[in-house]
């Protein structure tokens, strides 16, 4: 049996059938809850979910059917957990909460991984249809109100506006850091390409930034910016401050320069020497050769570096919540300070979703650019 399918299937079955905490029912959001295993919290849907997981395993099953079974298992677990939370909260005070336990997350991640592994054998169109179908089913599940009793949804309803504002702020911070890193990396990559002697020192400088822990770099920028603003007060008129978006954007951009610089310089050097020589023989200028020969050939390489940088930006800017930059990281660290798991998840889950979505879109663009014209 394919271990790529067997391992997540076994993990999902273990989370369903072993006495792992699936739900935690507590009188309020601050007190620890009473754990319930999957069988006690869900009832008969556990058996159906287990059968759907097993249906994704046999080699004789078509890949589309196997992927659909795994996706159906994941969606069933989410919906049944919402129903189970509603039953568990019956007769309790409005302040009572039904939180998600480790068993639920283990089973959900395992079934999603199983679905992705099964979908790998499908054609791109089949994977796209499966993804769209899963997204549509999830939207219907949210609209149905089945999962409203879960404490995560209760926390979201109480902070919906704050979560949406944090999401937009997170995207703005990540986008600003990416643009700043491109403005630094692109000209330096061109300089290193034109003068190879610069490649070593530039690469060492960019790599040196990667050695510095992220939290340390974010914190180090605060006194540096404070001293700079004290020496040049006019910079405050541009909206710069020692605490806030500035250190978050600058620190994140510093980490993004290495993958961008490597991909741009590597892409410029990846042009076929024969094509470049033919362009020179035709009398083309260096600027025209770069524009019409080097850059088109460099796009697939650059797209790979851009994909890494985009995912890094979404993740690293989370630390901006510690320096007053806001974003989803602020929700994560607020939840940590309050020991509120659901509040942490309100920040963490969108970050994971954004990173996965950005990676999928950038990977698709990378594959498309790599296709021969």
Image (spheres, grey):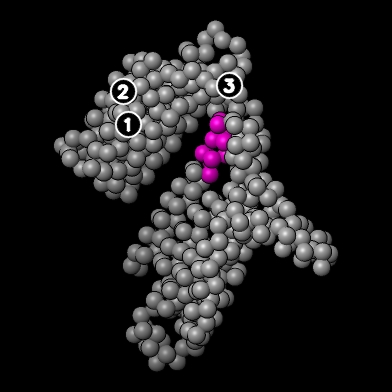
Mark 2 residue element: helix
Compared across the picture, whether 108 is left or right of 327 comes to left
Return the x and y of residue 93 as percentages of the image width and height: 60, 11
The residue that label 1 is drawn on is: 12
Mark 1 residue element: helix
CB contact under 8 Å: marks 2 and 1: no
Count neighbours of disc 2 (C-alpha within 10 A) and say few if under 14, some if 14 to 19, many if 20 or more.
Answer: some
Looking at the magenta stretch, what is its main secondary structure? Answer: helix
Of labels 1 and 3, the one closer to you: 3
Return the x and y of residue 186 as percentages of the image width and height: 55, 72
Label 2 to label 1: alpha-carbon separation: 9 Å
The residue that label 2 is drawn on is: 17
Label 1 to label 3: alpha-carbon separation: 28 Å
Q: Is residue 140 above or below residue 176?
A: above
Q: Which residue is painted at 59% across and 40% down in the image? A: 332
The N terminus sits in image quarter:
top left
Q: Which mark is residue 347?
A: none
Q: Which residue is painted at 55% across and 7% down in the image? A: 91
Q: Is residue 138 above or below residue 97?
A: below
**Is residue 73 shown to the viewer in this render?**
no
Is residue 123 or residue 6 the one in the foreground?
6
Return the x and y of residue 363 as percentages of the image width and height: 41, 56
Q: Is residue 90 above or below residue 193?
A: above
In the rendered structure, which segment of residues is drawn in magenta?
341-351
Return the x and y of residue 280 as percentages of the image width and height: 42, 90
- Looking at marks 1 and 3 on the same chain, the residue that comes earlier in the sequence is marked by 1
Q: Which mark is residue 31?
A: 3
Mark 3 residue element: loop
The C terminus sits in image quarter:
bottom left
- Looking at marks 2 and 1 on the same chain, the residue that comes earlier in the sequence is marked by 1
Compared across the picture, whether 40 is left or right of 190 comes to left
Q: Total of numbered circles in the picture?
A: 3
């Amino acid at each position: 049996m394919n271990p790529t399918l067997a391992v997540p299937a076994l993990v999902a079955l273990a989370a369903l059938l072993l006495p792992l905490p699936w739900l935690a029912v507590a009188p309020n959001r601050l007190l620890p809850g009473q754990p319930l295993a999957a069988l006690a919290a869900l009832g008969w849907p556990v058996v159906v979910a287990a059968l759907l997981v097993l249906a994704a395993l046999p080699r004789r099953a078509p890949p589309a059917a196997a992927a659909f079974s795994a996706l159906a298992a994941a969606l069933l677990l989410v919906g049944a957990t919402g129903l189970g939370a509603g039953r568990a909260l019956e007769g309790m005070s409005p302040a009572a909460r039904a939180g998600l336990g480790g068993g639920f997350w283990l089973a959900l991640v395992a079934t999603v991984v199983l679905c992705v592994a099964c979908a790998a054998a499908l054609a791109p169109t089949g994977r796209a249809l499966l993804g769209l179908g899963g997204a549509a089913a999830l939207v219907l599940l949210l609209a149905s109100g089945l999962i409203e009793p879960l404490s995560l949804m209760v926390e979201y309803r109480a902070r919906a506006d704050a979560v949406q504002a944090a999401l937009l702020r997170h995207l703005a911070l990540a986008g600003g850091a990416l643009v700043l890193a491109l403005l630094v990396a692109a000209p330096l990559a061109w300089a290193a390409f034109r003068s190879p002697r610069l490649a070593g020192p530039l690469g060492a400088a960019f790599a040196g930034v990667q050695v510095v822990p992220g939290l340390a770099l974010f914190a180090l920028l605060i006194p540096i910016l404070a001293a700079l603003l004290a020496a040049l007060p006019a910079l405050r008129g541009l909206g710069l401050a020692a605490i806030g978006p500035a250190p978050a954007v600058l620190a994140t951009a510093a980490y993004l320069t290495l993958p961008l610089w490597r991909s741009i310089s590597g892409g410029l050097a990846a042009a076929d020497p024969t094509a470049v020589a033919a362009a020179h023989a035709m009398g083309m200028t260096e600027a025209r050769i770069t524009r019409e020969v080097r850059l088109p050939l460099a796009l697939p390489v650059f797209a790979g570096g851009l994909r890494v940088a985009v995912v890094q930006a979404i993740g690293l800017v989370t630390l901006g919540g510690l320096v007053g930059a806001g974003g989803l990281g602020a929700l994560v660290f607020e939840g940590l300070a309050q020991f509120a798991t659901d509040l942490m998840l309100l920040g963490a889950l969108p970050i994971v979703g954004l990173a996965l979505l950005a990676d999928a879109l950038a990977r698709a663009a990378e594959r498309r650019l790599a296709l021969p014209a």
